[in-house]
């Protein structure tokens, strides 16, 4: 038996606006991809054997 107050259709119902979700995802991608590229390029140029020898 579930206890409900009959407010399932109230103004507090959970909803995801598709446009807002898409905008947030695109902004996250536009900021995250360049932020990850700089360290990735530096790591790609790194000599692995030299990096291991210095630790």
Image: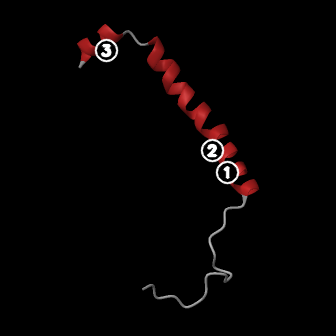
Q: Please state the horizontal and vertical placement of residue 32, each as a whole percent of the image.
A: 59, 38
Nearest the viewer among 19 and 44 is: 19
Residue drawn where x is 56% and y is 26% of the image: 37
Sequence-wise, which precedes: disc 3 or disc 1? 1
Cβ atoms at labels 1 and 2 below 8 Å apart = yes
Q: Please state the horizontal and vertical placement of residue 2, each as a whole percent of the image.
A: 45, 84
The numbered disc on residue 28 is 2
Left/right of residue 28 with respect to residue 38 in the rendered view:
right
Q: Mark 1 = which residue? A: 24
Nearest the viewer among 15 and 2 is: 2
Q: Secondary structure at mark 2?
A: helix
Q: What is the number of callouts on the image?
A: 3
The numbered disc on residue 51 is 3
Q: Secondary structure at mark 1?
A: helix
Bin the neighbour count of mark 1 within 10 Å (Cα to Cα): few under 14, some 14-19, many 20 and up: few
Q: Quadrant where the C terminus lies?
A: top left
């Amino acid at each position: 038996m579930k206890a409900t107050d009959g407010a399932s259709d109230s103004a507090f119902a959970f909803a995801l606006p598709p446009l807002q979700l898409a905008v947030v995802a695109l902004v996250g991608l536009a900021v995250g991809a360049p932020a990850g590229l700089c360290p990735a390029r530096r790591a790609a140029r790194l000599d692995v054997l030299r990096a291991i020898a210095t630790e």
